[in-house]
Amino acid sequence: MSTATTPATSAVKPAVSTATVADVVAEVLTELGVGHAFGVVGSGNFAVTNALIARGVPFTAARHEGGAASMADGYSRFAAHPGVLTLHQGCGLTNAVTGIGEAAKSRTPMIVLTADVAASSRLSNFRIDQDALALSVGAVPERVHSAETAVADVTRAWQTAVHGRRTVVVSLPLDVQAAPAPASTTVRRPVAPAPMRPAESAVREFARLIAESERPVFVAGRGGRNAGAEIAALADHVGALVATSAVANGLFRGHEFDLGISGGFSAPLTAELISNADLIVGWGCALNMWTMRHGSLIGADTAVVQIDDTAEALGAHRPVTLGIHGDCRTTAVDVLSAVGDTAQRYRTSDVSARLTESRWWNDTPTEDLSTADTIDPRVFSAELDRLLPAERLVAIDSGNFMGYPSTYLRVPDHHSFCFTQAFQSIGLGLASGLGAALTRPDRLPVIGTGDGGFLMGIAELETAVRLGTPLVIAVYDDAAYGAEVHHFAGPEHADDDVDLSTVTFPDVDLAAVARGYGATGVTVRTTADLAAVAAWLQSPKGVLVIDAKIAPDGGAWWLAEAFRGH
């Protein structure tokens, strides 16, 4: 497997005289640097997958291409080198397209190697327009055109994925894959572009807005994850409170003035402090309907600054007072050198004391909705947070339940929170959590999912069991597609005769199903049932599936906000 010490230039020397373009593709990627490969192997991607394995790239065989795609996505979000997804032509790619769409919309640096039919195979059952399919979900289509261009084609794809932070789908026609490799070829590592510096005029204007503010709040998003230290240093200097979008959860963990997640998941105190800000700064953050609650967290007279290295992102979701086209790290450094005083502004002793007392939902009193045979999802989440080790990695599926593990299961830093919600598809959480867990083997992976998403992605429960590492899957089981139930049977539909039979199901013994896969299964209806979870955590081994029979919540507190955007 390639490491940071890989030479900038090296010659591809085929191991055997019968080396093919598939070998060249694997060699180039290994030389440039990839971390882990995932896939379902068929005849079309058999050769290239084995070529990667032969060169030291670890490979995880999934049970479904969709699961493999989400594993590669989860891995690539946190790893030092991009993950690789390998697929059969046609149906292998279509099976994976939802996971690829999630990765593309999340700007995950990931490489998809998908076989393609030969140009001469006009009548192949596998023939589809793979480039158009990739483009339709926001991925970048590339292909290996010939033996002579293979190195350049693969290098270009790698550069786009790594330096452009994009998901790239590389089509490998079968006839090109099987063609003899060139006698010798040179691999040159692309030079990383310099971070984009903000204009001096923008820095001065930003510094002026800070100087005029009394209650500044910094909100870091996906694009600010690699600049946490610099953003925190500027916040410390100017007395700003710090928060994150959901995808950057944990970036400021341990900071005295960390507000946690901004938006629909915000605890009441966090929402109050952000809505009272007179300056909100989005660092690589879209400031969209989720993060700003459709703008309700922004006061009428609040100045809004947005920093992003992608120009079209500036002001895309709402008007901004100042849009800065620049890298978050360099912008924070430049502004720090430009601002004058060190007034602590919003960082009062009262704010500090209030945050200490009720920063988290865990510390916020709520009504207990538990019944004799169901548990309030907030009670379950808070108790699970208390039982789990602090060193954990949390991955979240989508659904009505998702706010509970996202907010109650606290993570040590932003390298331990995998949030696959860009495509808003359920069923991705289990697989993406498996991929993310491979980047932090020192932390216990915990996957939060609903019963619908768990059953949709359950093929990868066998993969989890086969991997053999400790893993907790917490299933928030309401025997329904809960988001739809609450959306179509909420208070606004009280007088409607709504048929919910399409989105409700008989209660399933998911713990028994889990045991059938070789996992440990526990059913939780009351807090007393969590004793079995505590016992497993004393000596974690294999996979633990917690089937938490949750009480109806009338629609999660964030759900009404979410559906306003539909």
Image: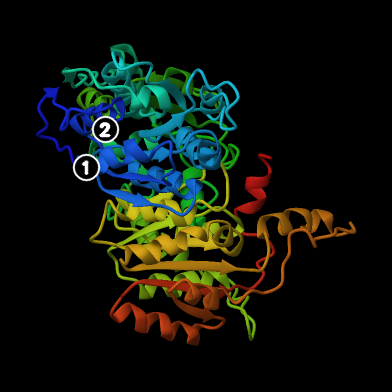
Neighbours of disc 2 within 10 Å: few (<14), some (14-19), many (20+): many
Relative to 158, is 234 above or below?
A: below
Q: Where does residue 207 sit, x and y in percent of width and height? A: 31, 23
Q: Amino acid at mark 1?
A: Ala
Q: Quadrant of the N terminus?
A: top left
Q: Which residue: 51% across, 23% down?
A: 131
Q: Which residue: 37% across, 46% down?
A: 38
Q: Which residue: 33% across, 40% down?
A: 49
Please indicate whether residue 91 sits to the left or right of residue 59 in the image: right
Looking at the picture, tell me which residue is in the foreground, 364 or 29.
Answer: 29
Neighbours of disc 1 within 10 Å: few (<14), some (14-19), many (20+): some
**From this viewpoint, is residue 309 visible?**
no
Q: Are marks 1 and 2 in contact (CB under 8 Å)?
A: yes
Please indicate whether residue 415 sits to the left or right of residue 7 in the image: right
Mark 1 or mark 2, earlier in chain: 2
Looking at the picture, tell me which residue is in the foreground, 374 or 332.
Answer: 374
Q: Please tell me the numbered disc located at residue 26.
A: 2
Q: Where does residue 375 sit, x and y in percent of width and height? A: 58, 77
Relative to 186, is 86 above or below?
A: below
Q: Where does residue 398 sit, x and y in percent of width and height? A: 55, 52
Q: Which residue: 21% across, 34% down?
A: 30
Q: Amino acid at mark 2?
A: Ala
**From this viewpoint, is residue 543 visible?**
yes
Q: Where does residue 427 sit, x and y in percent of width and height? A: 55, 53
Which residue matches tag 1? 54
Total marks in image: 2
Looking at the picture, tell me which residue is in the foreground, 503 or 407.
Answer: 503
Relative to 515, is 421 above or below?
A: above
